[in-house]
Each structure stands twice: as structure tokens, then as C-alpha cells.
Image (cartoon, rainbow, N blue to C red):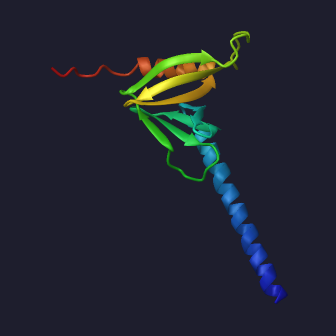
Amino acid sequence: MPGVVWIALVVVVGLVLALAGVFFLRLRTLGHRVGSFECALRTPTGWASGIAHYGADSLHWYRLISLDPRPDHSWSRARFHVRSRDARDPSAAVTPSRIFEVSCEVDGREFVLAMRSGQYSGLSSWLESQPPREMSL
């Protein structure tokens, strides 16, 4: 019987180590992509930390604590609108680490992202640089 307990313990420890490896590999892959940045999303229960990634036609947001390789949210670049930008601490000096809460809207759905000032500059540049859309008559 003790042999079975040791085998079960080794299997459980092996699974935990494998899951930890997958988790850290996912974080490394997401964080080292060109166009990735740290970005929190406000949820009904609070803030969720994540990594956002600029695609050619959409912004993808990945939850930080997850094993899922797919994004939790993808927002179309053509329909993405920044409604407002507010500094979390308006009295803080202008620094690269200043945090902004950015109210956004896509297809009538509103959400709030939190990011550093430099990352907001990148978001606004990405939105402004989109190719012109065809006008329908």
C-alpha cells in the first residue's frame, strides 16, 4: 500500500509542475510578443490583471492568471472607441508609471481598461493609424 501512495504523490507533483511550466511558458510567450503590454480590465467583481496585444485588426486581451492560450476578449479596431481617459491619481507628477483608466466602447458595450501613460499613448496611436474605412452611401 505505501508504494501506491508514493506513486500517487509523484503523479500529483508531476502534474502540478507540468501545469506551472505551462503557465509560465504562456506568460513568457504573451509578454514577449511585439505589441504586448500590461493592461487591467474592470470586471463586475473588481480589476483583472492581463496582457493586451495589438493585432492588425483587433486588440486581444488575455487574463494573466489563466492557462487558456486564447484571448478572453478581442475588440475590433474599426469599432473600438475611447470615450474618456482619467488619471488614477491626478495629483501625481507626470511620470512614465502614471496609471490611466480608459473608458472604451465597442459595439455599444462599455468597459474600462487601466494602463500606464506610455501604453495609453501606444493605444491611441494604434487606433489613429488604422487604414481608412470605405464609406457606404
Q: Spot the residue most to the left.
A: 137
The answer to whether residue 48 shows anywhere in this view is no
Residue at 68 percent across and 62 percent down: it is 18
Q: Vertical placement of 137 versus 110: above or below?
A: above
Which x, y percent locates residue 21? 68, 56
Choose between 89 and 123: the one closer to the eye: 89
Residue at 70 percent across and 16 percent down: it is 89
Locate the C terminus and report the quarter of the image it occupies: top left
Choose between 85 and 2: the one closer to the eye: 85
Choose between 62 and 106: the one closer to the eye: 106
**Horizontal relation, residue 78 to residue 18: left or right:** left
Tell me the quarter of the picture where residue 40 sits: top right
Which x, y percent locates residue 54? 48, 32
**Horizontal relation, residue 13 to residue 133: left or right:** right
Residue at 84 percent across and 86 percent down: it is 2
The answer to whether residue 1 shows anywhere in this view is yes
Which x, y percent locates residue 80? 41, 26
Which x, y percent locates residue 28? 64, 44
Residue at 55 percent across and 22 percent down: it is 102
